[in-house]
Image (cartoon, rainbow, N blue to C red):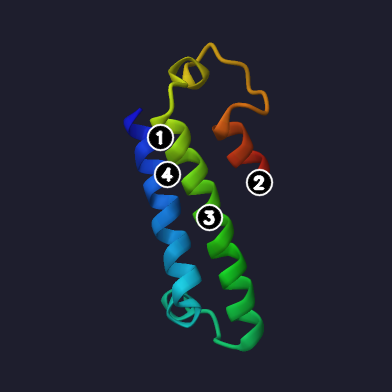
Amino acid sequence: MATLTALSTLRMASGAFFFASPELAAKTFSIPVGKPVAIVARMVGARDLAVGALLHTYRHGNNSQAISRDADAGPNNPVSVSALIN
């Protein structure tokens, strides 16, 4: 459960960083700053923020058995959905 919490928090933090300040995010990763880069960075940030929120809300629900190792990797498992989105 701690791994899922860390993963969701990291995804939301990186998503918020890319969405709020795409220019700073581009400079952090030594990418030339320009309008197309800012648009792509915001899109990536929005996606990571949404996936992190999905994982975070799933963690707080009563879904502990779906996260177990015995659960199948179906569409109801948020880790599978996150992997599909990437």
**Precedes in sequence: disc 3 or disc 2:** 3
Q: Are marks 3 and 1 in contact (CB under 8 Å)?
A: no
| Pointer 4 with pointer 3, Cβ within 8 A | no
Mark 2 and mark 4: span between their CA atoms? 14 Å
Q: CA distance from mark 3 to mark 2?
A: 10 Å
Q: How many marks?
A: 4
Tell me: residue 26, above or below residue 50: below
Which residue was labeled with disc 2? Answer: 85
Q: Residue 4, which numbered label? A: 1
Q: Amino acid at mark 1?
A: Leu
Compare marks 2 and 1 and give the one earlier in the sequence: 1
Choose the circle earlier in sequence order: 2 or 4. Answer: 4
**Lower sequence index among marks 4 and 3:** 4
- Residue denoted by label 4: 8
Q: Residues within 10 Å of mark 1 (few under 14, many from 20)?
A: some
Question: Spatial distance from mark 3 to mark 1, Cα to Cα?
Answer: 14 Å
Residue, far left: 2
- Per the image, the residue denoted by label 3 is 48
Would you say the residues marked 4 and 1 are in contact, meaning their CB atoms lie under 8 Å apart?
Answer: yes
